[in-house]
Amino acid sequence: MRNQKVLRFTLGTLMAAILLLMGFTPLGYLNVGPLAITFNVIPVAIAAVALGPAGGAAAGAVFGLTSFFQCIGIGGLSMLGSALFAISPVRAAVLCFVPRILDGLLLGYIFRFAGRLIGSIGACFVTGFFAAALNTVFYMSALLLLFGSTPYMQALIDGRNLFLFVVAFVGVNAVAELISSTVLSGAVGAALFRARLIPQPIKKEKIA
């Protein structure tokens, strides 16, 4: 039991350190236009796999912190984030933190559910996919809810249908995040299970 607690603490600390490293270097964000292709969803997915919903939420909070820092030019500068921060620092903080914490929290439950259906290894890839998908959905939903009526966002929307705007806005970024998160989160999670670095792996259950 003590070894498992030490291992969980070590894994959690490692994921937080990786998120901070990625947040302060080009490893975490690839800025393309107003949005950035983010790879920080990968450590969040791995934390959710290894540490469950609470660990995923904690990793999501660290991800949100690095995103908020980019709004004020620490570890890089987000064009969109800096513009939104100028409009409302409080709403910008909510946008950075809430979608990422919720993403990490739900990923822990998604992994548990998928693990009961297809086993732990397959569930790692499923979790990686949803890490990027939910991050995009939650972030864009919060963006429109918090800033959709502002002149800045109205200029970006430019009278288009909201669904078409979101598709055009996230575009290639979302596809790149989905592919990278699914492949890398799945591969790293599977490697951790095979190396027995994640305690008590989920066993595949037979479905009647």
Image (cartoon, rainbow, N blue to C red):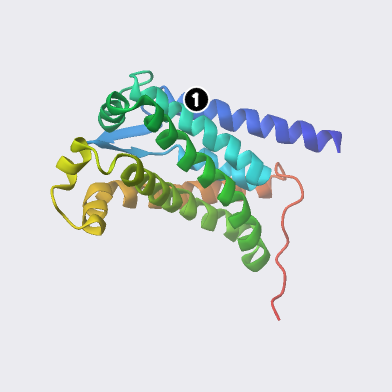
Give the farthest residue toward the front. Answer: 149
Tag 1: amino acid? Leu
Viewer-side residue, 189 vs 93: 93
Q: In the rendered view, tell whether residue 163 sits above or below residue 23.
A: below
SS of the residue under disc 1: helix
Instruction: Give the residue at mark 1.
Output: 20
Looking at the image, is 164 positioned above or below residue 103? below
Which quarter of the figure is the N terminus placed in?
A: top right
Q: Is residue 172 in view?
A: yes
Q: Position of residue 126 (x, y in %)?
A: 53, 58
Image quadrant of residue 50? top right
Tell me the residue at 34%/47% (across/down): 140
Residue found 66% across the figure and 34% down from its top: 11
Quadrant location of the C terminus in the rendered image: bottom right
The answer to whether residue 50 is seen in the rendering is no
Mark 1 crowdedness (10 Å alpha carbons): few <14, some 14-19, many ≥20: some
Q: Looking at the image, which is closer to me, 148 or 80? A: 148
Q: Is residue 194 left or right of residue 17?
A: right
Q: For residue 94, what is the image quadrant?
A: top left
Q: Quadrant of residue 199?
A: top right
Total count of labels: 1
Left or right, 152 with reference to 63: left
Task: Pinpoint residue 112: horizontal percent, then vertical percent.
Answer: 66, 57
Residue at 58% x, 40% y: name it: 57
Camera-side residue of 192 and 151: 151
| Residue at horizontal 36 percent and vertical 27 percent from the top | 26
- Residue extending farthest to the right is 1
In this rendering, position of residue 89 left or right of residue 4: left
